[in-house]
Image (cartoon, grey):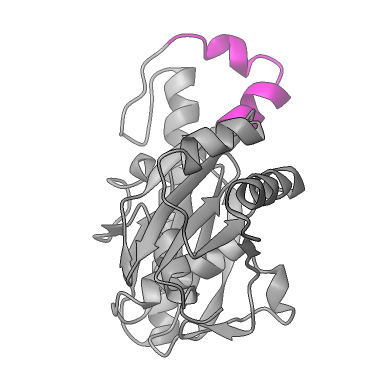
């Protein structure tokens, strides 16, 4: 393996990156990338970085950003990035999907990153545009997962697809309490409490499957929205996907 690698995690709205050097993962950087050109990618991600030995990419942001990254990296460094896909087995994890590549690579890398922390069975939660929940047995066997809209997508669906909620929600305060005395609070509080309750249900189900309470590992840009609402203590790991990519860098 090359001594250094640029690791890139492309989500639905944000791009995160860090440098892996001699087995040590550097700090995570993050930016929204929706309107980026290749010049902006180069300035943000590559502008202050030395040429790495390799570039590894986990991308759920679509073909446009994949092409942008590949073109910019090859132009600047003459490196063809490795665009990762989920596989049947890697990083100590056994994929539950019958067609392994159809599992989102961000979920795959997050599970690998969580498993590498040595916490035993784990409930791996990523809260962003969508919220994903995956169960991992202590052995590394993937127990399956689920995907629901994230808090902002839940809120937007109500605002855009109901006749008068948006008007009623123009003003009002939101709190952490479950119940609200105004429409704006009812929507926002309902969304985050629904997501937290789903995590609690997943933890209960995984405990029954694993024979003991799993560790709750949470990542994603909206993780703070549910952090204080779930019943179990959690470990918040903002760079969880990049940690998984660091493990995979030894295998690809």
Q: Residue at x 36, y 80 (%)?
A: 121
Q: Residue at x 49, y 43 (%)?
A: 46
- Seen from the viewer's position, the closer of residues 233 and 138 is 138
- Seen from the viewer's position, the closer of residues 129 and 40 is 40
- Residue 198 higher or lower than 115, as above or below: above
Q: Quarter-wise, where is residue 180 in the image?
A: top left
Q: Position of residue 185 (x, y in %)?
A: 42, 23
- Seen from the viewer's position, the closer of residues 250 and 61 is 250
Q: On the rendered image, what quadrant is the C terminus found in?
A: bottom right
- Residue 31 higher or lower than 140, as above or below: above
Tell me, yes or no, if residue 21 can be seen here.
yes
Is 164 contained in the magenta span?
yes
- Residue 167 higher or lower than 225, as above or below: above
Q: Position of residue 114 (x, y in %)?
A: 38, 71
Tell me, yes or no, if residue 222 can be seen here.
no
Magenta stretch: give its range: 155-171
Is 92 contained in the magenta span?
no
Q: Is residue 22 left or right of residue 134?
A: left
- Seen from the viewer's position, the closer of residues 7 and 229 is 7
Q: Residue at x 67, y 52 (%)?
A: 70
Q: Is residue 166 left or right of residue 238?
A: right
Name the outermost residue toward the left.
Answer: 233
Q: Quarter-wise, where is residue 222 in the image?
A: top left
Name the outermost residue toward the bottom.
Answer: 139
Q: Position of residue 101 (x, y in %)?
A: 71, 73
Q: Is residue 50 left or right of residue 74?
A: left
Q: Position of residue 91 (x, y in %)?
A: 47, 81
- Residue 42 higher or lower than 89, as above or below: above
Which secondary structure dominates the residues rendered in magenta? helix
């Amino acid at each position: 393996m090359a001594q250094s690698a640029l690791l890139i995690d492309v989500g639905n709205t944000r791009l995160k990156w860090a440098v892996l050097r001699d087995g040590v993962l550097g700090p995570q950087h993050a930016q929204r990338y929706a309107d980026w050109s290749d010049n902006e990618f180069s300035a943000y991600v590559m502008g202050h970085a030395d040429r790495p030995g390799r570039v590894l990419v986990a991308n759920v942001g679509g073909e446009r950003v994949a092409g942008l990254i590949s073109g910019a990296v090859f132009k600047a460094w003459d490196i063809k990035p490795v665009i990762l896909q989920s596989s049947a087995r890697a990083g100590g994890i056994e994929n539950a999907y019958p067609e392994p590549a159809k599992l989102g690579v961000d979920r795959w890398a997050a599970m690998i990153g969580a498993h590498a922390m040595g916490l035993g069975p784990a409930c791996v939660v990523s809260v962003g545009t969508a919220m994903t929940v995956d169960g991992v047995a202590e052995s590394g066997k993937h127990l399956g997962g689920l995907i629901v809209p994230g808090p902002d997508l839940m809120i937007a669906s109500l605002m855009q697809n109901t006749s008068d909620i948006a008007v009623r929600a123009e003003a009002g305060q939101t709190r952490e309490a479950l119940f609200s005395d105004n429409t704006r609070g009812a929507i926002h509080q309902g969304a985050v409490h629904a997501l937290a309750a789903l995590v609690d249900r997943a933890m209960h189900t995984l405990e029954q499957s694993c024979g003991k309470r799993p560790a709750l590992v949470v990542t994603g840009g909206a993780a703070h929205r549910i952090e204080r609402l779930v019943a179990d203590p959690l470990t918040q790991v903002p760079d969880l996907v990049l940690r998984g990519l660091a493990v995979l860098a030894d295998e690809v």
